[in-house]
Image (cartoon, rainbow, N blue to C red):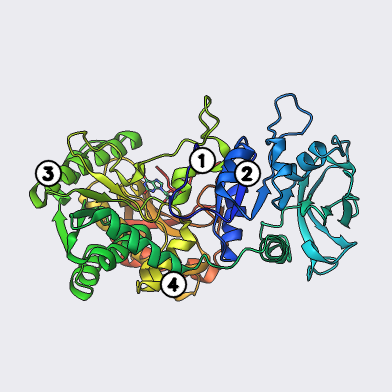
């Protein structure tokens, strides 16, 4: 089968055919929020292959194309004969209409973008308990002109006469709006109606069920062999450490490489937490001097990352030989790492998504061939929010479960130009102040990432009677759903004032604090 199944033992109850929408993954996440396992597959997956998966429902995603375009992506028309309920979203609905004999009208100045109140014409089945007048998020040019036989209009908006349609007999439904996005009120209700009532999926995708299955599978895969895990302290590798510890106990060895670019107090916290409190075997590798000496005189960001990546592999290799031998390497690869978003990673020959096997940013991507590990990746079917739930359920504290993402190369990519001990010391202290003040203001969990960046330029200031000539710190606080796009967080002035005051007063070497108010795109989240 050419469909990528992260977990061979669990077939998806709902399959999402991806037509290249930026929301395909989000649909999958929303379905899973209803405790039903879902997977995203390529739009060209044949009806024959889908049949083998025996899903209880199919969702056709939106997409950037128009159904008339010569090379518009079509699904296998035999899907309509499978006797499986289908929900088409936006492009998916238009495709359904076209393939079933209706008619779609090209964009003609009546395109609809943004929020629109939904007027309900039939409040049963798909729209049961969706409030009349609910705001739904529209984003489409084309619209349905003529319904296929057996379909009725379930709802309309001011500009779209057929905003929701359905053939109750055949259990085919379509919506012109995006119920999966947060701006759509009652969107979740609609999704639940489809999943639970129309497809009759039992809610069996629970954290508890996942943990039980994952533990059994790891035990079966690994037997009595030894497993090595590179622990970074992030939520993925920490959750994995807890899961594997439950599954295989002392057969697990975690390696924590301290490259010297961690945040203040982090190495100590990690060792105390995993090793001493939870008795998970963690080997602490102090490689601080090795890393910083390699960065001596290096200012180019790409070169810095490469050097750090290469050095990480060297240390990892040496230490795994010293501590080993190990048969397996455990990695915290997640579902978005293996499917890649927006349908961009499709094999031109087979039309399949290409699974990205190794999480490259964890720096293990380029492991030398002679280090022959087999991989253990029990989280590779999960989204980040699901990993957090698993971590929490396994007993990880919220400091780890809900911590902000932190890049593998650490503070080294938040110091522009050459990395030196002085600058690291300075940035570590400033970074701690940013996090402390954001937490004190109760904003930590509303913000995706909050951190400090050190710029290698000096500006003039005055402290007491002394003229200073010191570095500025940039404060970067952003909100985001997935790190792919981001907006700068509107942190209250009072909090910014505390951050600024504390940094210039408490951090030696800094005399100015500036705020980064750039969204992504065009800015990236990190400065390097
Ligand atoms: P950018 O800067 O590309 O960051 O907008 C997007 C997200 O990825 C994180 N990031 C990294 N994570 N290794 C990592 O593990 C890296 O080299 C790296 N670079 C960026 C960044 O913190 C943000 O969450």
Q: CA distance from mark 4 to mark 3?
A: 39 Å
The C terminus lies in which quarter of the figure?
Answer: top left
Residue at mark 1:
3
Of the image marks 2 and 1, the number of the one nearer the N terminus: 1
- For label 1, count other residues whose C-alpha is less than 10 Å away and answer few (under 14), some (14-19) or many (20+): some
- Secondary-structure class at tag 4: helix
Is residue 463 in sight in this rendering? Answer: no
Residue at mark 4:
439
Q: How many marks?
A: 4
Residue at 88% over, 36% down: 108
Label number found at residue 518: none
Residue at mark 2:
17
Dot 1 and dot 4 residues touching (CB under 8 Å): no
x, y percent for residue 113: 78, 48
Of the image marks 3 and 2, the number of the one nearer the N terminus: 2
Residue at mark 3:
318
Q: CA distance from mark 2 to mark 1?
A: 11 Å
Instruction: Nearest to the eye among marks 1 and 3: give it.
Output: 1
- Secondary-structure class at tag 2: strand
- Secondary-structure class at tag 1: loop
For this view, does 131 lie left or right of residue 24?
Answer: right
Of the image marks 2 and 4, the number of the one nearer the N terminus: 2
Dot 2 and dot 4 residues touching (CB under 8 Å): no
- For label 3, count other residues whose C-alpha is less than 10 Å away and answer few (under 14), some (14-19) or many (20+): few
Residue 77 drawn above or below residue 8: above
């Amino acid at each position: 089968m050419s469909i990528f199944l992260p977990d061979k033992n669990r077939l998806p109850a709902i399959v999402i055919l991806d037509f290249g929408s930026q929301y395909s993954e989000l649909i999958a996440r929303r379905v899973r929020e209803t405790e039903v396992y879902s997977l995203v597959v390529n739009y060209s997956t044949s009806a024959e292959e889908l049949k083998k998966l025996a899903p209880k429902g199919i969702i056709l995603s939106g997409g950037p194309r128009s159904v008339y375009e010569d090379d518009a992506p079509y699904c296998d028309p035999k899907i309509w004969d499978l006797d499986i309920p289908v929900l088409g979203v936006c492009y998916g609905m238009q495709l359904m209409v076209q393939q079933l004999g209706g008619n779609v009208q090209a964009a003609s100045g009546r395109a609809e973008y943004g929020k629109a109140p939904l007027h309900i014409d039939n409040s049963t089945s798909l729209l049961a308990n969706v409030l009349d007048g609910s705001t739904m998020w529209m984003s489409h040019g084309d619209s349905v002109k003529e319904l296929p036989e057996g379909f009725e209009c379930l709802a309309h908006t001011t500009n779209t006469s057929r905003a929701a349609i359905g053939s109750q007999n055949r259990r085919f439904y379509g919506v012109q709006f995006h119920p999966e996005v947060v701006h759509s009120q009652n969107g979740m209700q609609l999704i639940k109606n489809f999943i639970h009532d129309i497809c009759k999926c039992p809610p069996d995708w629970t954290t508890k069920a996942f943990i039980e299955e994952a533990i059994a599978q790891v035990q079966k895969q690994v037997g009595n062999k030894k497993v090595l895990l590179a622990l970074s302290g992030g939520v993925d590798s920490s959750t994995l450490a807890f899961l594997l510890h439950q599954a295989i106990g002392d057969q697990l060895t975690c390696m924590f490489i301290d490259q010297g670019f961690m945040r203040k107090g982090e190495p100590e916290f990690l060792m105390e937490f995993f090793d001493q409190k939870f008795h998970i075997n963690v080997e602490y590798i102090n490689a601080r001097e090795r890393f910083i000496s390699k960065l001596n005189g290096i200012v180019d960001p790409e070169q810095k990352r490469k050097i750090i990546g290469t050095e990480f592999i060297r240390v990892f290799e040496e230490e795994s030989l010293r501590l080993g031998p190990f048969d397996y390497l455990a990695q915290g690869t997640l579902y978005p790492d293996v499917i890649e978003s927006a349908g961009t990673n499709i094999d031109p020959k087979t039309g399949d998504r290409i699974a990205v096997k190794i999480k490259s940013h964890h720096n293990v991507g380029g492991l030398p061939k002679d280090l022959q590990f087999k991989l253990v990746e029990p989280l590779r079917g999960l989204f980040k929010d699901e990993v957090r739930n698993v971590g929490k359920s396994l007993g990880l504290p919220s400091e780890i479960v809900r911590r902000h993402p932190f890049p593998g190369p650490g503070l080294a990519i938040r110091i522009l130009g050459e990395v030196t001990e002085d600058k690291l010391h300075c940035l570590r202290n400033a970074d701690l102040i940013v996090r402390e003040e954001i937490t004190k203001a109760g904003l930590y969990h509303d913000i995706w990432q909050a951190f400090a960046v050190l710029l290698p330029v000096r500006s003039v200031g005055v402290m007491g009677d002394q003229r200073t000539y010191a570095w500025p710190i940039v404060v970067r606080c952003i909100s985001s759903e997935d790190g792919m796009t981001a907006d700068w967080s509107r942190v209250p002035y009072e909090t910014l004032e505390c951050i600024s005051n504390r940094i210039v007063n408490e951090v030696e070497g800094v005399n100015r604090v500036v705020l980064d108010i750039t969204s992504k795109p065009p800015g990236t989240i990190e400065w390097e």
